[in-house]
Amino acid sequence: MKRAMPHSVIFLWLKKTMLIACLSALTLCANHLQSASHLQSGNHLQSAEKTVGSTDPIADSRVSKNHHSKDIIYLAVAANFKSTLQQLVEHFLLEQPDSNKYQLKIISGSTGALYAQITQGAPFDIFFAADTARPKLLIEKSYAKKASLYSYAYGQLALAFQANNKNTCDQTINRESTLIEFISAFQSPSKPTLAIANPATAPYGFSANSLIHRSKDIFSRYRIVKGKNVLHAQQLLLNSNADLAIISAAQAQHATMKNIHFCIVDHSLYPAIEQAMVIIQQDKRTTRQQKLINEFSHFIKQEKAKSIISVSGYLINGYLINGHLINGN
């Protein structure tokens, strides 16, 4: 007759068996989770690739095989000049059969915001500012090439408001008395709201703010709202969040502004808006990139480009303020 196993031995055997079973189960779960993780990562990667492909021209399948993503140049532009720059790019490409629109990527924003991004290492190649101060600062701080500084346009302010029978103004407001008369007589259902770009970051906002302070008693009845840039100020007007806006005269060309009335304000009534471009210093550029940058910079200075800029509502050759010619060209 076999001797019975002690209870302690049986207990230890059962404990060991259960431990082995648990470890096996945990291993199986871990393998399953790892497989799922790989699958999910693959899905995320595919999703990310689709997102890049749909929004970023670098990954666009229509780009020629000869035009690698590293040959793209990035154009940082003040919001007011974005639509004009798009036209310039289109005309430039007509003269460049070896280039395509996916190689010139436009990024817009307020001049101040773009300047900050450049100083923080943003990979921009050409900066189209709405002033000369920030391009010059970039040169002083060795972020840009001094020889590339060029004043490409002179901006004009305009009063913009919904076209109706209540409010009208001359096509151009040449005198401060005319401006005061219009601002005083402007009608709205309640306390009127005036939209401008942020004076701290947008040169058009700075000049608009100076215009307001020039006649601050008259403007005191207005509630002032500030957009991030002139395009945001325009949007506030279009969305009926403002009754009146002081923006760029060039914005009259926008298709969305067909029901908006514009009155250009004479440039003698506010600080000059001289707009300059500059080439940003970058350590690593391909030969093709540098060639494209040089060619586009050269194109901006040609008569065809100047004509496009002028038709868009900008002045090219500067203007007189207090008897002094404002002209950086």
Image (cartoon, grey):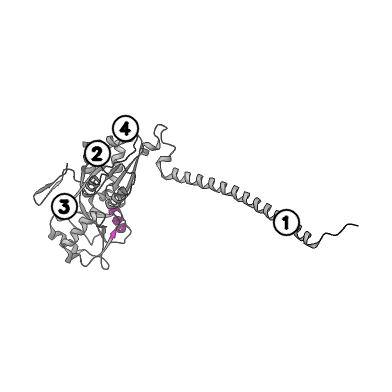
Separation (CA) of disc 1 from disc 3: 91 Å
Which part of the image, by quadrant, shows the N terminus?
Answer: bottom right
Q: Position of residue 294 (x, y in %)?
A: 27, 35
Q: Which mark, by number, is residue 267?
A: 3
> For residue 230: magenta?
yes
Question: Mark 1: which amino acid?
Answer: Lys
Q: In the rendered view, would you say 83 is above or below 246?
A: above
Question: Mark 3: which amino acid?
Answer: His
First in sequence, mark 2 or 3: give its number. Answer: 3
First in sequence, mark 4 or 2: give its number. Answer: 4
Q: Which mark, by number, is residue 16?
A: 1
State which mark lies toward you, 1 or 2.
Answer: 1
Q: Residues within 10 Å of mark 1 (few under 14, many from 20)?
A: few
Element marked by disc 4: loop
Separation (CA) of disc 3 from disc 4: 37 Å
Residue picked out by circle 4: 96
Q: Which mark, by number, is residue 261?
A: none
State the extent of the magenta-drawn residues as a range: 226-242
Residue drawn at x 76%, y 61% as measured from the top left: 11
Residue drawn at x 50%, y 45% as measured from the top left: 45
Q: Residues within 10 Å of mark 4 (few under 14, many from 20)?
A: few
Element marked by disc 1: helix
Is residue 184 visible from the viewing direction of this image?
no
Residue picked out by circle 2: 300
Residue situated furthest left in the rendering: 323
State which mark lies toward you, 2 or 3.
Answer: 2
First in sequence, mark 1 or 2: give its number. Answer: 1
Q: Nearer the viewer, residue 279 or 324?
A: 279
